[in-house]
Amino acid sequence: MIRTLRDLINTSSNITRDRPAIVFGSAPSIRSLKHNAFTGVKIGVGDMPWRAPEFGPFDFWVTSNTYYPLPQEQKHLRDMIASTSTILMSPECVRNTQSDLSVELIQLEKIFTAFDFVLYDQRHFGNLVCKPQANCCKFVSHFNINVSIQELLNETDPNDSSPYGLSHTVASHGFALAVLLGCNPIYIAGVELPEKNKNYKAYNNFKNPIISFKGRIHKILTRFEKSDFFGSARLETLQDFYKIAKIAKLHGTKVFCLSKTSPLLQIPGVDYMSPKNFKQMDV
């Protein structure tokens, strides 16, 4: 059986509810948490579980990009299996597919059935497709994903405000997952949202998960095509975190950021906790 995010929430929230959770981004500030004996729910986003397995094992690996990790790539799949994490996979994994998508979807169906994957959507609201219709729409239709992570979270909002947006960082989806799982408190680490690409560095920055020349070029081009986290992109990203934090507060969930340089500290409901104090806590 292939699981969706709603399936995961229905089966796991009784285990994760009121347990502390930490969302691991990959910014260099994460190194302040090395050797920490955290025993709560660990959520790695992007390539963090591959980039820094020493912070794991991660309970959940939330992915949402077009170059890594892609389950249809054997090397990437080996990395995901080796992580022992529950993998949350979005339609982004097929957005750039150039081959026969129907064949690739059948291949993915076998993979998702055999290994611990959970499928979620972060792009289509109200079951609407993109214009023009894209590969991601066909992925959602094929796997019968009828609600986005944003809408799932919004279902828990008694004020029924609008859901958070498409987001410019997968870290927001990792944060939303922690709220959906009922975790409390939630700690966010390694999420810096640098304004300029030149300042975009990762922990273990020398590591690159992309082996093929084509994949490396695509990642470089994608990086330069971005408008950084400046202007509207930065504002939209902070608004997404604000909406998630607001819902967390409605549920009585405390949220702490473990980096004093993170712009997430501008958000009401997100408080600072020093890594030193965090390490001294019984978590």
Image (spheres, rainbow, N blue to C red):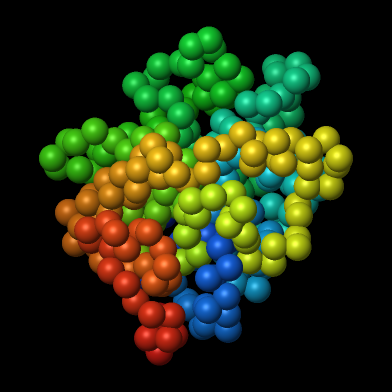
Q: Is residue 154 left or right of residue 2?
A: left
Left or right? Give the position of 115 relative to 15: right
Q: Is residue 253 or residue 31 the one in the foreground?
A: 31
**Residue visible at 57% across and 75% down in the picture:** 31
Task: Evaluate whether residue 150 shows in this view.
Answer: no
Number of marks: 0
Work out which quarter of the rendered image holds the N terminus and state it.
top right
Please determine whether, in this image, residue 11 is positioned above or below residue 23: above
Look at 49% across and 11% down and name the residue there: 131
Place of residue 55 in the rendered image (x, y in percent of width and height, measured from the top left): 59, 72
In this rendered view, identify the residue nearer to me: 140 or 175: 175
- Quadrant where the C terminus sits is bottom left
Which of 59 and 35 lies nearest the eye of the viewer?
35
Q: Quadrant of residue 151?
A: top left
Residue 97: x percent and y percent? 71, 24
| Residue furthest out toward the bottom | 280
x%, y% of residue 235? 35, 43
Q: Residue pushed farthest top?
A: 132
175 shown above or below 114: below
Q: Position of residue 105 (x, y in %)?
A: 68, 24
Task: Work out whether residue 55 or residue 209 is closer to the camera in this orientation and state it.
Answer: 209
